[in-house]
Amino acid sequence: MSGAAAAAGGPEPTPPPTTQIVGGQPASETYSFMASLQSASGGHTCGGSLVHPSWVVTAAHCGTPYQVRIGTTDRTAGGEVRRVVERRQLAADMTLLRLGTPSTKTPVPIAASAPAGSATRLIGWGQTCPTRGCGAPPAGLRQLDTTVLADSSCAGIQGAYELCVNGGGGRGACYGDSGGPAVVGGPGDWRLVGATSRGTAGTCAVSPAIYGDVTSVKSRIDAIVGGA
């Protein structure tokens, strides 16, 4: 992801997509809702969140992947693999992907809101160094605990549909994390608030990052998945 940087995407990269958490740690649990967006060969392009057995929320700039792998900490194995058959645009850099076959994994509920000061956890796969191409992305899922900031901390943010999330000091999302979740709560009670969109600088983890505010489109998501 980038200010210049946004995560590694699929066939429709506008801006260039992202894949990494810098300064994080290995995932402390298996997040049943965590999705890896993949090419036909299984290559990871972006993250996503299962919000309904048949639907995944991700970043629009990630494009339309061939498949998703859901509910594993290893993006190369385990969990469930489902083909993607439809894409529905939401708002700003957020989109829904419909799965050809419903997942049996547990979806993540969407939070009511994400006010500034909220503690949030970022989850994703990707290189763990801050510049594009500086290292290979890990197969193992990683996480980082941070906070939601006031919109004024992120230049270029669309306040109605986006969140500003703390980053800097060598800690933050980066290339390949695009589309992946920002969640609040804790084990057994995770709730989705954001989808990784882009950074505010050309190098990752030196400044706050911008996330799609999934809470702002909850009613739209409910209407789409309810009619599935």
Image (tube, rainbow, N blue to C red):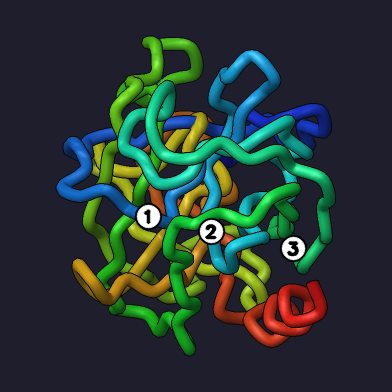
How far is disc 2 from disc 3 in space, using C-alphas? Answer: 19 Å
Labelled pair 2, 3 in contact (Cβ < 8 Å):
no
Say above or below: 141 vs 220.
above
Labelled pair 1, 2 in contact (Cβ < 8 Å):
yes
- Which residue matches tag 2? 50
Quadrant holding the N terminus: top right
The percent coordinates of residue 194 (x first, y second) are 50, 64
Estimate how packed mark 3 is, as few (under 14), some (14 to 19) or many (20 or more) residues with alpha carbons within 10 Å.
some
Image check: 214 left or right of 34? right
Residue 23 marker: none
User: Which element is circle 2 on?
Assistant: strand
- Which residue matches tag 1? 32
Camera-nearest label, 3 or 1: 1
User: Which element is circle 1 on?
Assistant: loop
Image check: 66 left or right of 6? right
Residue 194 shows in this picture: yes
Badge 3 amino acid? Ala
Badge 2 amino acid? Leu
User: Which element is circle 3 on?
Assistant: loop
Mark toward the start of the polypeptide (1 vs 2): 1
> Which quadrant of the structure image shows residue 137?
top left
Residue 92 marker: 3
Task: Name which residue lies at 57% across and 18% down.
Answer: 43
Badge 1 amino acid? Ser
Task: Name which residue lies at 53% across and 59% down.
Answer: 50
Labelled pair 3, 1 in contact (Cβ < 8 Å):
no
Residue 5 shows in this picture: no
How far is disc 1 from disc 2 in space, using C-alphas? Answer: 8 Å
| Total marks in image | 3
